[in-house]
Image (cartoon, rainbow, N blue to C red):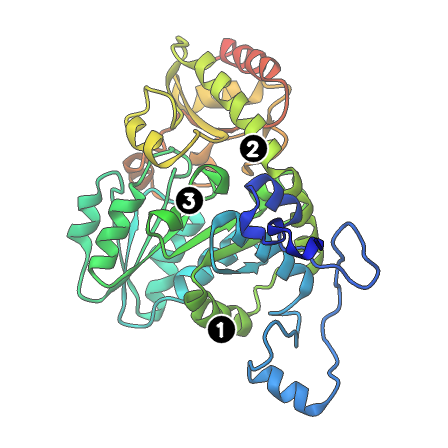
């Protein structure tokens, strides 16, 4: 029998580990093993009629300008769609470009957004400051209780936006419950899934309409490039999401798409190893006399532990530490680390620590920070690929200086 009959030629039949290596791959006539980088901006056409049909959308899979159609970017999107279980996707120049597109492409003047108040600072800006400039109201609620979303819904609510676990306090939002509430009111649900990763949480399976990622984080995960992606149904992606990208131009470069494809080949290995280490670090810090609390989704001490076990297969790579002594204590710990770097990035091969109150959430008022759990002593730790014993020893030394 010909290999053409092999059922494994259907990418959907492959495991996630295999999809991350082969998914979406296309080869040129040179039969390269590593995906090609198409750095061209435009394309030529065999005839004027072909160009006409292409611009009318009557030639499937065609390319007419790399602002919105590029073979290397296509391969990255297809691989991510397979991993996510999505029908389609579009890639962007950064994670914030992806979030801005996902939100703004779904609303019009006169609409209303409900969002969880515990959001990354940039995401909160899009919902709370940017969208209202264009006549889109927003209401922010405590996302830990789904009933808060139900109470905030209005007749003109078109969108609900959440991230779970949240940045940086690792609060959880019940995706299925909130999806049901959104859909009952005719609204769509967007989930920022960066912290959990596509390996440990599947928002589309729980009712989300769109999922966003900063591909800069775990997908590249090696501090090299920026990127973002929005994934969902073909109907949503090929209509508003694609149109917004095409007309506003927050395009992922072909080179960055190629780097992200290479990142996906080791994505599973890296994230699993980092999660193993995060579990060990969280356990080692629990009960330390200079730590008020350790926040990790799959630690039994997490107040939403049962929800975490239900919607996340593992606790992922990030944890938060509330250090005694407030900001001075947090700074003393961070400033005395030798292996762990001070940086506001996350999901990297290198372990990174940041003080959200003075970095990622600095633009928020103190009242809002405290309301969302960003206390003066809070540190967010992104666990990398180093030996976990070295990380624990580094943290213990830092805590001795507090």
CA–CA distance in space, label 3 to label 2: 16 Å
- Judged left or right of residue 135, residue 6 is right
Q: Are marks 3 and 1 in contact (CB under 8 Å)?
A: no
- The disc at residue 243 is 1
Q: Nearer the viewer, mark 3 or mark 1?
A: 3
Decide: few, some or many residues near mark 3? Use Cα within 10 Å; few <14, some 14-19, many ≥20. many
Residue at the (36%, 63%) spot, across then down: 131
Instruction: Return the disc, 1 or 2, that comes first in the chain's sequence.
Output: 1
Disc number placed over residue 202 in the picture, else none:
3
Q: CA separation, marks 3 and 1?
A: 25 Å
Residue appearing at x 29%, y 39% in the figure: 367
Q: Does residue 146 appear in this view?
A: yes
Residue 305: % across, % down: 31, 26
- Extreme-front residue of the structure: 1
Q: Secondary structure at mark 1?
A: helix
Residue located farthest toward the left when viewing the structure as drawn: 151
Where is residue 319? Give x, y as percent.
Answer: 45, 27
Mark in front: 1 vs 2: 2
Secondary structure beneath dot 2 equals helix
Question: Spatial distance from mark 1 to mark 2, Cα to Cα?
Answer: 33 Å
Residue in the image at 73% along x and 76% along y: 43
Task: Give residue 271's mark.
Answer: 2
């Amino acid at each position: 029998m010909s290999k053409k009959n092999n059922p494994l030629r259907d990418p959907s039949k492959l495991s996630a580990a295999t999809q991350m290596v082969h998914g979406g791959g296309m080869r040129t006539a040179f039969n390269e093993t590593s995906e090609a980088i198409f750095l061209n901006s435009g394309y030529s056409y065999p005839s004027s009629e072909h160009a006409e049909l292409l611009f009318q959308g009557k030639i499937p899979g065609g390319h007419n300008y790399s602002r919105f159609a590029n073979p290397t970017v296509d391969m990255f999107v297809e691989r991510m769609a397979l991993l996510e279980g999505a029908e389609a996707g579009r890639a962007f120049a950064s994670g914030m470009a992806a979030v801005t597109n996902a939100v703004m492409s779904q609303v019009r003047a006169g609409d209303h957004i409900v969002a969880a108040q515990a959001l990354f600072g940039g995401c909160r800006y899009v919902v709370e400051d940017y969208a209202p400039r264009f006549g889109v109201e927003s209401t922010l609620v405590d996302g830990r209780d789904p009933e808060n979303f139900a109470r905030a819904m209005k007749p003109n609510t078109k969108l609900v936006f959440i991230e779970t676990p949240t940045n940086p306090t690792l609060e959880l939002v019940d995706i299925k419950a909130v999806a049901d509430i959104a859909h009952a009111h005719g609204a769509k649900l967007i989930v920022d899934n960066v912290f959990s990763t596509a390996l440990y949480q599947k928002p589309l399976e729980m009712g989300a309409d769109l999922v966003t990622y900063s591909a800069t984080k775990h997908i590249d995960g090696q501090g090299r490039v920026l990127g973002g992606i929005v994934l969902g149904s073909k109907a949503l992606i090929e209509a508003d999401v694609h149109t917004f990208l095409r007309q506003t131009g927050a395009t992922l470069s072909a080179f960055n798409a190629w780097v992200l494809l290479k990142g996906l080949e080791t994505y599973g290995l890296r994230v699993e190893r980092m999660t193993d280490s995060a579990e060990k670090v969280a356990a080692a810090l629990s009960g330390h006399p200079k730590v008020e609390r350790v926040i990790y989704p799959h630690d039994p001490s997490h107040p939403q532990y049962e929800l975490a076990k239900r919607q996340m297969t593992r606790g992922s790579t990030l944890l938060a530490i509330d250090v005694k002594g407030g900001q001075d204590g947090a700074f003393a710990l961070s400033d005395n680390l030798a292996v762990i770097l001070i940086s506001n990035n996350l999901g990297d091969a290198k372990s990174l620590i940041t003080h959200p109150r003075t970095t990622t959430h600095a633009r928020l008022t103190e009242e809002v920070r405290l309301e969302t759990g960003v206390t003066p002593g809070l540190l967010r730790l992104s666990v990398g690929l180093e030996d976990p014993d070295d990380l624990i020893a580094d943290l213990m030394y830092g805590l001795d200086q507090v």
